[in-house]
Image: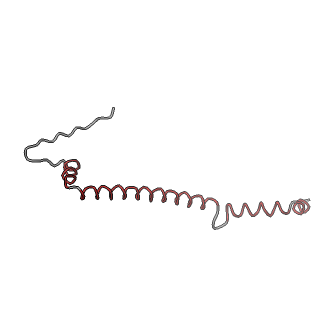
C-alpha cells in the first residue's frame, strides 16, 4: 500500500523531500537566507544614511570655508560665541 502510494506520487514525494531538505536541513536554509537578507538590507540603509550625512557635512564644510562671514555665523550658532559687548540668550522650547 505505501509502496504503491510512493510509486504513484513519486515526483510529488521527491519534490516535497527536496523542499523540506532545502528549507530546514541545507547549509543555505530558508531561515539563514532570510536573516542574512534582513541584515544586508539594514546595512544598505545604514550605508545610505551615512552617505547622506557625509554629503551634508561636505556641503556645510564648503559653505563654511568659501564665505568669510559664514565662519563667524557658524561659531555664533554652534558654540554660542559672542563679541565682548554682546549678550547671548538661549531659548529652549519645551515640548508639551
Foreground: 43 or 6? 43
Q: Name the residue at the top extreme.
A: 96
State which quadrant residue 61 falls in: bottom left
Place of residue 43 in the rendered image (x, y in percent of width and height, measured from the top left): 48, 59
Query: Which is nearer the eye, 70 or 37?
Result: 70
16 left or right, relative to 64: right
The C terminus, quarter of image: top left
Q: How many marks?
A: 0
Query: Where 77 falls versus 38 (above or below)?
Result: above
Q: Looking at the rendering, which quadrant does residue 55 occupy?
A: bottom left
- Tell me if residue 96 comes above or below residue 59 in the rendering: above
**How far across and down, in percent of the image, does residue 79 sit?**
20, 50
User: Relative to 2, does residue 77 appear above or below in the rendering?
Assistant: above
Q: Residue at x 69, y 63 (%)?
A: 22
Identify which residue is drawn at 56% across, 59% down.
Answer: 37
Q: Position of residue 16 (x, y in %)?
A: 77, 60
Image quarter in which the N terminus is found: bottom right
What coloring was used for the rendering? secondary structure
In the picture, measured across the screen, residue 29 lies left or right of residue 95, that is right
Identify the residue at the far bottom of this view. Answer: 27
Q: Residue furthest front?
A: 67
Quadrant for residue 71, please give it: bottom left
Q: Residue at x 7, y 44 (%)?
A: 85
Residue at (73, 61) in percent of width and height: 19
Q: Is residue 43 left or right of residue 22?
A: left
Q: Closer to the camera, 66 or 93?
A: 66
**In the image, is residue 82 above or below residue 41?**
above
Amino acid at each position: 500500500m505505501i509502496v504503491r502510494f510512493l510509486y504513484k506520487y513519486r515526483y510529488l514525494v521527491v519534490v516535497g523531500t527536496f523542499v523540506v531538505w532545502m528549507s530546514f536541513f541545507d547549509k543555505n536554509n530558508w531561515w539563514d537566507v532570510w536573516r542574512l537578507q534582513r541584515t544586508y538590507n539594514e546595512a544598505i540603509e545604514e550605508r545610505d544614511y551615512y552617505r547622506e550625512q557625509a554629503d551634508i557635512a561636505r556641503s556645510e564644510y564648503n559653505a563654511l570655508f568659501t564665505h568669510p562671514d559664514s565662519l563667524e555665523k557658524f561659531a555664533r550658532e554652534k558654540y554660542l560665541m559672542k563679541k565682548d559687548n554682546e549678550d547671548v540668550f538661549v531659548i529652549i522650547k519645551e515640548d508639551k
